[in-house]
Image: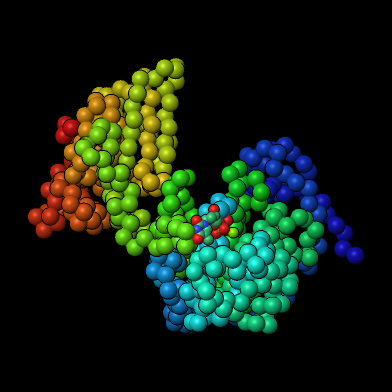
Amino acid sequence: MAKVRTEYVCQSCGATSPKWVGQCGDCGQWNSLVETHAAPKAARSGGISGTASGRIQRLQDVSTEESPRVSTGMPEVDRVLGGGIVPGVVCLLGGDPGIGKSTLLLQVLASVQGRLPTLYVTGEESLAQVRLRAQRLGLTNLDVPVLTETSVELILAQLGQHKPAFVVIDSIQTLYTDGLDAAPGSVSQVRECAAQLVRFAKATQTAIVLVGHVTKEGAIAGPRVLEHMVDTVLYFEHDPGSRFRIIRAIKNRFGAVNELGVFAMTDAGLKEVSNPSALFLSRHGDPVPGSVVTVSRQGSRPLLVEVQALVDQSLIGTPRRVTLGLENNRLNMLLAVLHRHGGIALGDQDVYANVVGGMRIQETAADLPLLLAALSSFKSRPWPDDWIVFGEIGLAGEVRPVAAGEERMQEAAKHGFKRAIVPEANKPRRSAKLGIEVLPVARLDQALELL
Ligand code: TYD
Ligand code: MG
């Protein structure tokens, strides 16, 4: 019998340690190490070491035939997948519990049914529950094959027998493999189960979607440990209280990253929002201080987004800097630039910044709108509500160009915006054609003078 080794696995990042420590040396999480019995070598490698069938080829000899994609029949899902389902793709769909992962995938399965042989494997719900949900979604003539099973070995046996081309595993945290004696949901189980499914997908060209729950602290085996193993990582995002759901592609070996799909949760499931451009504006009656509209580029799609700021006299020694949907460090940096290059000190003011509708902006194009919103709130002077702003701000107070400037201005013009404050270097050659008046700025102080 192989000797059983004991090791300690961090439940947050998956790092292993030979002895217990209070804080994970890799990710810094406290109290996250759990004792596990490491699997004997053979079970771990899953037979991979025995494959001698690999052949060394030169890149020029590799066939570049595009693998045919199968549309899911839901354009917003196709968009985040990069154009449809690719044979052999393994996709991780993460998100908070209750956000709508099972609902969406059931709708996708029903939509794909007939074009691809599918299988829905659920380890979380009973078949009756799945059936009830399908009825609630109005999918009455649903003939999707369903399986309740949590053992990876038995699931793989079923897959080998029925040969579906598109499989949904709901969820990866409920699966376990006999090769390990850790509890289902622990990092080592999640990782090993996913590895077996990935090997199967690649060997048989089966497309597999793995559902993964993200917990707030990431304490229970976060699906993050799987991100490097799969081809595509999609995350559900939403604003608590809003019925809109956003799916964002964090990683995609078969398409663009940061691509967004937008859905609305209704009482009959998720409905696609095909033109979400004006969704993230709050439509005030009159212009209000602290609000600036920008055009953010999410994947291949420009979106109009409202950035809001509130600047208020601070009552505590260290003023608060709070951001929602924006990066906190970036706000601190921008306020320093505003002080040094704009001569405006907000050192005794609390600054709160928010993006409307639960949207998250990661690109630097939101720098200038964020500063102008903060300034507008500070001075209690509103910006005209038919202006849009975008641009990156450098530490020297310069306004730097951003990608796809013209496309952003076109999108704004399409929605009736009249003027655009943009980086000098993004100034279009023929602005008349865009249908929007362009106010180029090269430095921060030029932008400040416009207020
Ligand atoms: P679900 O898909 O079960 O979430 P997950 O699999 O991500 O945990 O979604 C459950 C939530 O969605 C639940 O709170 C109820 C809501 N919902 C609707 O509003 N309308 C519907 O038609 C369905 C099926 C669910
Ligand atoms: Mg679910």
- Residue 257: x, y in percent? 42, 59
- 7 or 236: which is nearer to us? 236
Is 94 drawn above or below residue 72 in the view shown?
A: above
| Side of 420 where 122 appears, left or right | right
Which coloring applies here? rainbow
The residue under the point 27% across, 44% down is 283
Residue 392 visible to the viewer: no
Query: Vertical placement of 360 versus 43: above or below?
Result: above
- Which quadrant of the rendered structure holds the C terminus? top left
- Which residue is at 25% across, 48% downward? 401
Q: Using residue 37 as the reference point, say whether residue 235 is left or right of it.
A: left
Choose between 265 and 445: the one closer to the eye: 265
| Residue at the (37%, 35%) spot, across then down | 353
Q: To which quarter of the image does residue 248 belong?
A: bottom left
Question: Which image quarter: residue 77?
Answer: bottom left
Question: Residue 406: horizontal and vertical position, in percent?
Answer: 21, 56
The percent position of residue 438, horizontal first and vertical second, equals 14, 47
Farthest-out residue, left: 432
Most extreme residue toward the right, as rendered?
1
